[in-house]
Image (cartoon, rainbow, N blue to C red):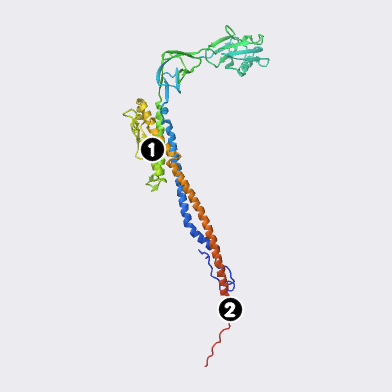
Amino acid sequence: MSSTSPVSIASSTSAGAAGGSVIDVSSLVSQLVAAAQAPQESLITRQTQAVTSEMSSVGQLKSALSTFQSSLAAIDTPGAFGALSATSSNTSAFTAAVGSGATLGSYSVSISQLAQAQQIVSSTAYSSSSAVVGTGTLQLSLGGSSFSVTIGSGNDTLTGIAATINSASGNPGIEASVVTGTSGAYLVLTSTLTGAANTMSIAETDSGTGLAALTYGSGSTNYTQQTAAQNASFSIAGIAYTSPSNTVTDALSGVTLNLQATTSSPATLTIADNTATIEGNIQTFVKAYNTLQQSLAQLGGYDAATNTAGPLMGNSALTDAQSQIQAALYGVVNTGSATYTSLASIGITANSDGSLSLNTAQLAVALSTHFSSVSTLFSGAGGIASGLNTVLTAQLGGNGPIASLSQSLVQQNNALTQQSQQLSQQMAALQASLTEQYASLNVLLSQLQTTSSYLTQAFAALPNAPKGTSSG
């Protein structure tokens, strides 16, 4: 492989001695500037890559801690352990759900009657659903609400009247249908509202009698009542109660009952601590911690198999966070119980790699026998979850060690950017200076080359010295 030297030797010929350029100034200056710039630029690049990598790793650390802190919300306050469950000993008769205001307890529930909606069927059997009934205006009432429908020649059939009722503005819940049997077609009116107060009545208000066969009120024989409007009747702990709906929200504070069938013997409603939900929340906490531990090991550990150190190995921000988290995690808490005072006592133990294992059977026993102690262990003053939350809040705060490290890295990155800009300016100045110097030298060498060529030609033009003679 050949290369061109930036300095050329002038030819001894007259053409080569014409005073052309002796030095390739551009090439020479570029090489000199590159040689001066390379080591400094390489150092800045390595330092920038290191700082950028550390900034990314700190971001990962912050994200891992923040995600873990989010998992504590379900167990870090006494209120988080306030979840209750409602169970029925006879779910065919009723089910229940708890909400705000419910308290622990067990209650006997008896149901003698379910709430019903009224349904009536016209006494007159019409020849078909398209049979003409008549025209006029009907006012239909359900409970305390009323609406009117006008029946004319375009909707005076049984089907037309039913459709008009169903689409009427202000209809509070009367559904009309036509049922055809072997004896003819019948108009069926059904209330969508349960309760004894939600009965139907129908009156013709046009001063005519075209729709008299469809009116209904006290003592009316125009309809047969198939289902009577009635309230639910039941008792809780022997206390009688009635409700217009089978969904009862106001009989027992914080509890919704869904009545489904009458009972022949009392059933039992139990409001208890929702240990299943709490157990699930604790399992989620263990999984979240193991995910955090894995992230911390990747960031600050050492992989002997690959001889690779984590990007934050030995970093004080990471080691400080680890030590404080472990101190809170493995602390002993005064729970009022001599048995359940630590994670290990409820079945949460540490593995050799720093992760946690959960013995669900041991946890279930602790929750069923000493629920309040388990609650205090996590959420009480000095509790494990509340303590972890305090540690993480301090670590992730605006004045915490992670924020300080992030700010320091940003400053370092800015300083390196400034150094890179300054180096570029210095190299531009060096290039300009060298270009000027070597251009001047090039002119001088060119002049010397021209002079040398002139002298060479002048000496060559001098007459030859006389040759000596010899005698024989």
Task: Judge by depth and name the residue closer to the eye, 129 or 216.
Answer: 216
Task: Judge by depth and name the residue closer to the eye, 383 or 232.
Answer: 383
The crowd level at tag 2 (other Cα within 10 Å; few <14, some 14-19, many 20+) is: few
Single out the residue that lies furthest toward the right. Answer: 153
Where is residue 194? Give x, y as percent. Answer: 52, 15
Q: Which element type, helix, strand or loop, lies under badge 2?
A: helix
Where is residue 378? Give x, y as percent. Answer: 38, 31
Occupied quadrant, residue 358: top left
In the rendered structure, which amino acid carries the disc numbered 2?
Answer: Ala
Task: Judge by depth and name the residue closer to the eye, 230 or 132.
Answer: 230
In the image, which disc is placed on residue 458?
A: 2
Occupied quadrant, residue 135: top right
In the displayed structure, 326 sits above or below 461; it is: above
Where is residue 340? Give x, y as percent. Answer: 33, 29
363 relative to 247 in the view: left or right: left
In the image, which disc is placed on residue 325?
A: 1
Between the residue at mark 2 and the residue at mark 1, the CA separation in whole angstroms equals 94 Å
Q: Which element type, helix, strand or loop, lies under badge 1?
A: helix
Q: Could you tell me which residue is drawn at 43 percent across and 40 percent down?
A: 400
